[in-house]
Amino acid sequence: MQVTRELFNDVMVPNYNPSEVIPVRGKGSRVWDQNGKEFIDFAGGIAVNCLGHCHPALVNALKEQGEKIWHLSNVMTNEPALRLAKKLTDATFADKVYFANSGAEANEAALKLARRWALDVHGEQKNQIIAFNKGFHGRTFFTVTVGGQAAYSDGFGPKPAAVDHCDYNDLAAFEALISDNTCAVMMEPLQGEGGIISPTNEFIKGVRALCDKHNALLIFDEVQTGVGRTGDLYAYQGLGVTPDILTTAKALGGGFPIGAMITTASIAEHLKVGTHGSTYGGNPLACAVAEAAFDTVNTEEVLAGVKEREQLLRDGFAAINDKYDVFSEVRGKGLLLGAVLNSKFEGRARDFLVASTKHGLMSLVAGTNVVRFTPSLVIPLEDIKEGLARFEKAVADVVNG
């Protein structure tokens, strides 16, 4: 069978519009397509491939577990799930772990747990969930409603109720919205899809204080920021603010689908037997790969390397901008960076992505105005330099029309 981009149009639901490029092989931070063209990967599968492609630790874990046991129902537990849960709780504020298959599922579990906790402890009037405009929490109907982008949640009929939004970094608006009837506040500790927006210190600490005042649970969606992405194992650790519930996915499996919700023992006890579940959640194959990814990332060397690579990228973007004057600023932290287009190039982020692809560089966008970069946390420094050189050619193309 000949596999071409045209086949996508014949057999796939049209909710995506992928590039003409069909990658077939990856190694480290380089990828090759069907025609043998090489790309440097500054996209990392949207902050998923935290160790690049075909990292030996992940390949070995997959092969070893693949010859032992792949799947069990949750009628039984398994060793990789228990080891990974222990490592997650040892490394964070949490005592308890729930495994799912994705960030959306981890967020769905967090929201259901928060509602159940509030119902059990405080009564049914305490049901409001507050989230933030431009936030993104997944594509299930509950998570997409909590996400702050109406374009993703409109057009599917009546939405889950008692969900309210205000602007990120607007503490006054948040304070006006929260009350004793708020059961949970869900936020990204650095907004990803919404444009790579870091929280101000006043805002993040103020949200935590107001949650405490009103007995509301603070849920951090660390699906994109977690597992080393910001230079801390989890972003909350670099902010000095601890949530009540945290969700993690994307980089957790290094490319293998897995998600987790982690929380304290006193909150966790409200998900009693039968209240929530997942057929594949916590399967031994996913957990074995995730354990290898987690062990590899959770070292001083790798986390310090993230900050070193951030500086190299920032210096490179500054040098390109000195020549071409296309960015107003570079936002973000660690290897979750967004180059914000200035007024001359407003709304043209996709043009930079397309031009980058032409020059052998994989990049991303966050909205129409931000070019987003989420490379491997261990991308070789020479690949960063070569990737920046390719990006400069792409910028030159866009600038010169």
Image (tube, rainbow, N blue to C red):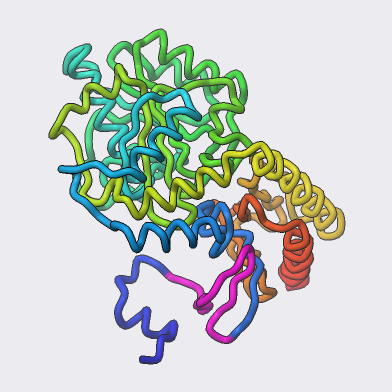
Dividing the picture into quadrants, the one containing residue 394 is: bottom right
Q: Nearer the viewer, residue 225 or 190?
A: 225
Q: Nearer the viewer, residue 42 or 358?
A: 42
The answer to whether residue 98 is magenta is no
Using residue 324 as the reference point, say whether residue 351 is left or right of it.
left
Percent position of residue 147, x then y: 38, 40
Using residue 166 as the reference point, say whether residue 81 is left or right of it.
left
Residue farthest along the bottom direction in this orientation: 1
Percent position of residue 158, x then y: 19, 43
Percent position of residue 371, x then y: 63, 55
Q: Nearer the viewer, residue 284 or 9?
A: 284
Residues drawn in magenta: 17-35
Percent position of residue 298, x then y: 57, 39
Which residue corresponds to the image point at 52% horizontal and 32% vertical from the top-left? 189
Which residue corresponds to the image point at 73% horizontal and 51% vertical from the top-left? 327
Residue farthest along the top direction in this orientation: 213
The answer to whether residue 25 is magenta is yes
Using residue 146 as the reference point, say whether residue 188 is left or right of it.
right
Q: Is residue 185 visible?
A: no
Using residue 106 as the reference point, say whether residue 398 is left or right of it.
right
